[in-house]
Image (cartoon, rainbow, N blue to C red):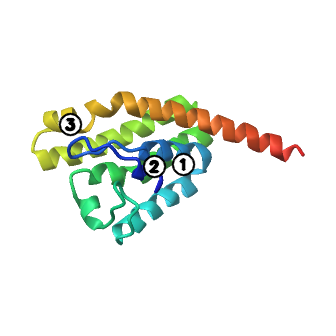
Amino acid sequence: MCIGSQITIPLGPIPFTFQLLFVFLTGYLFHPKKAFAIQMIYLLLGSIGLPVFAGFSGGIVHILGPSGGFLVSFPGAAICISFLKFKKGLSDLISGLLGLFVIYSIGWMWLGIYMKSLVLSFKVGILPFILFDFIKMFISIYIKKMLVSRLKLLSSF
């Protein structure tokens, strides 16, 4: 998460980062409690001021700011992806899409409160990111499959 948030392209109130790639990976690779804990630790580290958020920044101001809804949605999305994957047996794609829905819903509403317009917050906080977020999801599925196959290969020795 910390690495993914440092790859940043500013696009208005919501920067383009690779955080979601790591949210997906957390959900795909870890069981629900661990996936949730990883994301909560990330938020806690950033909230107390460690520079783990986008642009090597930290502090509670990021949680309370316009993009805070996206940040606070990460634990819920990770547990959703993981639960649907490990407990319900859904595919990576379906569990990832539902996790993305969690992120978009919370982030969009939160940003809408700041902007006083759900239409504008959708145009600024969701629309420019949809294609890239799908790409990040597919990349994370590929990375997960590579890691799982390599770990199986290593465990066979």
Q: Give the amino acid type for the residue marked by disc 1 in the picture.
A: Thr
Query: How far across and how far down the image is residue 80, in percent?
Result: 48, 44
Q: Is residue 139 above or below residue 155?
A: above
**Residue 124: numbered disc:** 3
Query: How far across and how far down the image is residue 147, in percent?
Result: 68, 41
Q: Give the amino acid type for the residue marked by disc 3 in the picture.
A: Val
Distance in Å between CA atoms under marks 2 and 1: 12 Å
Callout 2: helix, strand or loop? helix
Mark 1, residue position:
26
Q: Is residue 140 above or below residue 27?
A: above
**Residue 14: numbered disc:** none
Callout 3: helix, strand or loop? helix
Residues at marks 2 and 1 touching, judged by CB atoms closer than 8 Å: no
Asked if residue 89 can be seen in this view, the reply is: no
Q: Residue at x 34, y 53 (%)?
A: 71
Residue farthest to the bottom? Answer: 48
Residues at marks 1 and 3 touching, judged by CB atoms closer than 8 Å: no
Q: Residue at x 65, y 35 (%)?
A: 145
